[in-house]
Image (cartoon, rainbow, N blue to C red):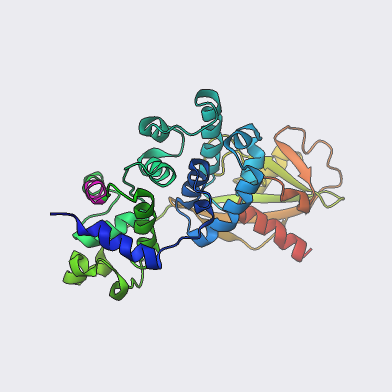
Amino acid sequence: MPDSFPKRLLRWYDVHGRHDLPWQHPRTAYRVWIAEVMLQQTQVITVIPYFLRFVEKYPKLRALAATPLDDVLALWSGLGYYNRARNLHRAAQICVERQRGALPRDFDALAALPGIGRSTAGAILAQAHGLRFAILDGNVKRVLARFHGVRGWPGDASVQKKLWEFAEAHTPHERIADYTQAIMDLGATVCTRAKPRCTTCPLKRSCVAHREGSVAQLPERKPSRALPTRKTIMLLLRDRAGRILLERRPPTGVWAQLWSLPEADSAESVRHRLGANQALHPMPPFVHAFSHYRLDITPLTGVVASARGVADSPHRRWLLPDDVLGLGVPAPVRRLIASIEENP
């Protein structure tokens, strides 16, 4: 018996789907790749302006591979999850080194590139080349979990295996690119996490969750646990010219390789490390939440009489606030610097 799932979904997509997203015109492998990576953990409305700026500056894969990582991180700044940008840059370089400057059309080679994996590889090949590969991003997991009444947290290996089986089974042999966009659109605009619009869903007649009244419970959430809290002190040092001291973070860990404010576990250790002995003044503390912990940040600010000797390392720079925009700087640090400019 033919699967009616893709037929109903495609009929809905032809009328209600999104047909004017910037990566659809033209829908090249490179543009789809950039969009898919940006869309990992980020909504379309947020991604669009970043995507447009990114492909304007780096219209081709070779241009991305040739640029310094600092420039890529600066353009990415504010989008979060910076490892995505580092992976994009490294994957582009690998493609230049091994694939003659193009993304591979072979699934295994594409999925093996940094930051891509099974679902993103499938999305690229399906949308750019019309090849029959399934996807399983967050939106698709939600649609399939509700449609089939799949219990359990989708991050669990056994649940994910089951969802992949459904994703593969429903993927049609025609209009692959449209189908791929359609199922993502349905999850993003109709089968949403909160307040889903079940009355307008083309799949509601066969949806297990709709029939059983379990839409709000599916997909099941990750088992909750209290997020640990870490504490740090950020030092916002300025010199007499109004420049701010920035420090490059280590190559691994949170905000890896981004430029940030110097940090330490105490004000004395920060001053000792930087050789700065001036008075420090507290600023309002704030909390920045990561996916796996909360960071309690206590900012301290001070003015040094002389910048000499304080930034005696290639990993530190004195920069005017406007020049900070040209570097990859974490969003909370940007906001902290902006608050100084607004309230000097």
Q: Would residue 318 appear left or right of 228 to someone viewing this image?
A: right
Q: Is residue 241 magenta?
A: no
Q: Residue at x 48, y 41 (%)?
A: 29
From the viewer's perspective, is residue 219 above or below residue 124? below
State the residue at coordinates (43%, 39%).
116
Position of residue 3 measured from the top left corner of the image (x, y, whole percent): 19, 55
Name the quarter where the N terminus is drawn. Answer: bottom left
Q: Is residue 142 left or right of residue 255?
A: left
Our reading of the magenta stretch's main secondary structure is helix
Q: Vertical placement of 16 versus 52: above or below?
A: below
* Viewer-closest of 78 and 146: 146
**Residue 51 showing in the rendered view:** yes
Q: For the point 48% across and 46% down, which residue is it?
A: 32
Span colored in magenta: 163-170
On the image, the x and y values in percent for residue 272 come to 71, 39
Against 64, residue 184 (above or below) is: below
Q: Is residue 340 left or right of residue 19?
A: right
The residue positioned 66% from the left and 45% from the top of the image is 57
Return the x and y of residue 187 as percentages of the image width and height: 35, 61
Q: From this viewpoint, which residue is outermost toward the front?
A: 174
